[in-house]
Amino acid sequence: MFADEDKVFKALADSNRRFLLDRLREKGGLTLGDLCEGRDMSRQAVTKHLVLLEAANLVVTRKQGREKLHFLNPVPIQEIYMRWIGKFEQNRLQALHNLKQALQEDADDQV
């Protein structure tokens, strides 16, 4: 599991790869040519970034005729969120819930 997370963190560390992921989040099923549009990168550079994103399981592909379509796979990011961020939010949300209950009990006692 840690090796998979390392690949995801490495993939997300580069702004070009984050840009590609953003493009795929906006619209999935893009070809290599589509992903190269609007970027000052060669097809080879974009391909190298896509290889890393695929290795991290952040991008999945499907062949459609002669084209290779790329799609965002958000699952690895969600897993990282649940492990690294979700646990911190859980404590904060529990504290807010406890505070709300305490305030409601105080309001009920004053009535």
Image (cartoon, helix red, strand yellow):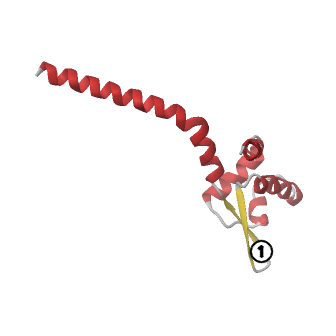
Left or right: 50 as drawn, with respect to 76: right
What's the residue at 73%, 66% (across, down)? 61
Figure quadrant of the C terminus: top left
Q: Where residue 11 sits: x, y (%)?
A: 76, 46
Figure quadrant of the N terminus: top right
Left or right: 45 as drawn, with respect to 17: right
Q: Where residue 35 sits: x, y (%)?
A: 75, 60
Q: Amino acid at mark 1?
A: Glu
Toward the viewer: 71 or 6? 6
Left or right: 107 as drawn, with respect to 71: left
| 66, above or below 6, in the image | below
| 90, above or below 44, in the image | above
Q: Where residue 50 sits: x, y (%)?
A: 79, 56
Toward the viewer: 69 or 19? 69
| Disc 1 secondary structure class | strand
Instruction: Single out the residue that lies furthest toward the front.
Output: 1
What's the residue at 72%, 53% (across, down)? 20
**How many other residues sit within 10 Å of disc 1, few (<14), some (14-19) or many (≥20)?**
few
On the image, which quarter does residue 62 sit in? bottom right
What's the residue at 79%, 65% (across, down)? 33
Q: Where residue 29 sits: x, y (%)?
A: 67, 67
Instruction: Single out the residue that lies furthest toward the left.
Output: 111
Q: How many marks?
A: 1
> Can you identify the residue that label 1 sits on?
67
